[in-house]
Image (spheres, rainbow, N blue to C red):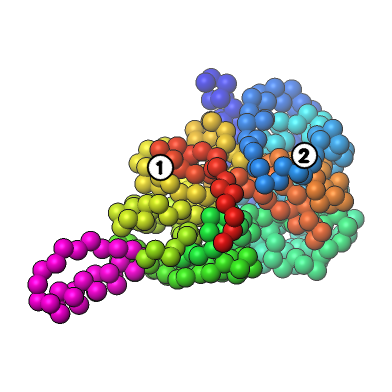
Amino acid sequence: MLVKFFRYCFYFITVTVLVSGCSGNKAPVFEENRINENKRFQEKKNGSRGSFKDFSDDELISQKSSSFPPKNVGIILPFDKAYENISKSIINGMTEAYYSSPRFMANTKLFFYPSNMHSFNQISNRVRKDEIDFLIGPLRKENFSKIMDQISDDINVLNLNISNSKNNRRKGFFRFSLNPEEEARQVAKFARVRGARAIVITQNSNWGKRISKAYHEEWNNSDGEILDHIVYEPNEKNFSDIITKALHINESYARKNFITKLIKKKIKFEARRRQDIDVILLATDHNDARQLIPQLRFHKAEKLPVFASSRAFAFTQDISFYKDLDGLYFLDMPLLNNRDYLSDAIIESIYPRLFAFGHDAMNLITYLDQMGRNEFLTFPGKTGYLRVNSEGIVVRNLNKYRIKNGQVKLAEIDQRSLQ
């Protein structure tokens, strides 16, 4: 416990120094001579490795086959108030990856550049002055073209977003992001194994619309049928009405009222839900999922499998959270397959998934050239099992989970024939 305490104290001080240094447009540098620090950061190096059965035919890339690490790595992140905690979480992950690697510490310096500098010329000038040979970033899409237009083609780049970068498929250019649409497509593929007929329940937000659109596209591509699409407002409080509408229970009550009025007698009645649904797809956050799933159980839909993206799950120590989501299938990082994920993730980062994102971004840089030449090479990262496709995009293959009896477990994949 004492070792952990000093470790996280060190992380806090490191991130504080980085952010304060960047805000003054000074790039903090990790010097080469701190190799002895590595001993303090080896405890959990292999703690996030999980299993992803769907990609068992892919070849796991060997650590011995990595290229020599670059001498100077530049990292462009936003440090304005709106993005401060996001960047801190990413830096936390990067620093753990850096201090966990003797090769990085012996050969590589890190330079941090705030993307909210007074001018983008200032960033390009600093990149040239610091002799950067590998660049990670930028994170914000709107800064991509403004920064990249001024960066030499000789510098390898791992861009931390997907959009607005399709025209930069030059050698040494790669893209990596926590793409919610790609995650939703994997959720739909997972759910499709359980049946062809689905209903979609979507939060009426930009994110909800993006996820539901990906659900629809993937479902249609696999010849499935979307029976109904229920949209609710983000401030919705009455989820019972949403569920009764989705399951046609309101129509069951309407039939009962019609018969009672017709025969003018009281009748014994038990509401019935529609019977043609195979699966339910949720495009919701974890707060809404906690209300929707118990309502599904209450309205006799407890046997219908419910699927969602990682946003339906939160890193929390609240036991009631897991009970509310009991039965939920979702996709998320291999990190969840580590028994210590809960306490570690909460302590390490405000945004655990962004912590893992930064960790993987740093570790990938010595493998990208090799992975770019072979799409079947897979890197076992914290955010997923990672491959590089023909467009230079790092594709995350996620683990499948189910919450059962208040515990997160790897899901058993039902291999029934598709209908």
Sequence order check, earlier mark of 1 and 2:
2
* Magenta-drawn stretch contains 262: yes
Which residue in the rendered view is the most extreme toward the right?
A: 154
At 87% from the left edge and 61% from the top edge, which residue is drawn? 170
When asked about the image quadrant of residue 144, the answer is bottom right
Position of 230 with respect to 152 (left or right) is left
Which one is in front, 344 or 62?
62
Residue under numbered circle 2: 60
- As drawn, 325 above or below 170: above
At 80% from the left edge and 45% from the top edge, which residue is drawn? 377
Position of 72 with respect to 247 (left or right) is right
Which residue in the rendered view is the most extreme toward the top?
A: 2
Q: Callout 2, which amino acid?
A: Leu
Q: Position of residue 349 (x, y in %)?
A: 54, 41
What stretch of residues is rendered in magenta?
247-273
Residue under numbered circle 1: 322
Q: Callout 1, which amino acid?
A: Tyr
Q: Position of residue 52 (x, y in %)?
A: 65, 42
* Magenta-drawn stretch contains 240: no
Q: Position of residue 365 (x, y in %)?
A: 79, 45
Q: Is label 2 in a helix, a strand or a loop?
A: strand
Give the total number of marks visible in the rendering.
2
Which one is in front, 412 or 201?
412
Q: Is residue 298 visible?
A: yes
At 63% from the left edge and 48% from the top edge, which residue is drawn? 398
Q: Local crowd at mark 2 within 10 Å, few (<14), some, or many (≥20)?
A: some
Using the numbered discs, state the Cα–Cα distance from disc 1 to disc 2 in whole angstroms.
33 Å
